[in-house]
Image (tube, grey):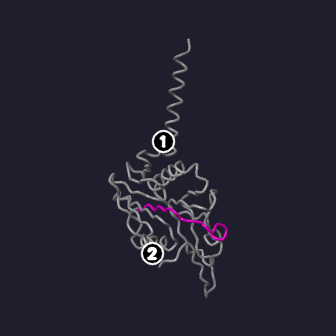
Amino acid sequence: MPTTLVQDEPKSHATLHQEFPSEIEDMQSDTHTWICTEFISALRALFSDDPDVTIGGDTGFYWNSQDDRERLVPDAYLIRHAGKHPRKSWKLWEEKAQYPNLSIEFILEVWSESNLLPQQLEKFVQYQRLGAKEYVQLDVSSGLLFGHRLNADGFYVSIPLNEHGRLPVQSLNAELTYENGLIRLYRNGKKILTLSEAQAELDALRTELAQLKSSSQP
């Protein structure tokens, strides 16, 4: 059975990397950045009133206190029972000590042609070991969106699409689909707006209101 959340095994050799760099950034394409940014903004809108949820992305997850080379950087994530404040990085052994009920509920990874299969398999195995309850992946080149959910034995099993062709994600209480170059969230059949879409609607309403006020003046 896989281990969950934190593995902190003693090392027999000297550790060389102990600064835990939290701001190392890999170069990403504009498409990748756009997909992740818009998805995270929609996810935050969906959980804006939930004080028990922390949402973020492109943040280092460290699980070995002796070696910071063991890390993952998910494109998006949702964590429960760890306070709502954002982190520059997650040192999971410290977080678990402070928040014993911490739960990695959801992880998203967006793959491009440059991401090789061994890298994808490595992340799949590690997220499973860390106990991430649901793991969703998008293959941008094919447009395929697929997900896995931990079973009772701690192993990932595939999440089937529902009758609408969307991916039901229990941890989000929502359905995911890839539409027009973006990952969209649906809840109760309603599409969740991204921050840019919500702002555009607000601007349109303000313009309409200004026009009504102008036309009503003598």
Give the residue pinned by disc 2: 153
Mark 1 vs 2: CB contact within 8 A: no
Q: Is residue 145 placed above or below 119 in the rendered structure?
A: above
* Secondary structure found at label 1: helix
Pick the quarter of the image with the C terminus: top right
Which mark is drawn over residue 218? none
Residue drawn 49% across the image and 70% down it: 127
Given residues 24 and 47, the one toward you in this image is 47
Mark 1 vs 2, N-terminal side: 2
Residue farthest right in this picture: 98
Q: Position of residue 100 (x, y in %)?
A: 63, 69
Which residue reaches farthest front? 152
Q: Position of residue 34 (x, y in %)?
A: 47, 52
Residue designated by label 1:
197
- The type of residue carrying mark 2 is Asp
Q: Residue furthest top?
A: 218
Q: Nearer the viewer, mark 1 or mark 2?
A: 2
Label 1 is placed on what type of residue?
Glu
**10 Å crowding of disc 1: few (<14), some (14-19), many (20+):** few
Quadrant housing residue 104: bottom right
* Image vertical order of residue 186 relative to residue 71, above or below: above
Secondary structure category for the residue under label 2: loop
Q: Is residue 124 above or below residue 8?
A: above
Range of the magenta residues? Answer: 96-111
Q: How many marks?
A: 2
Q: Position of residue 182 (x, y in %)?
A: 42, 51
Q: Residue at x 51, y 59 (%)?
A: 76
Residue drawn where x is 62% and y is 57% of the image: 86
Q: CA distance from mark 1 to mark 2?
A: 41 Å
Position in image of residue 175 (x %, y %): 42, 53
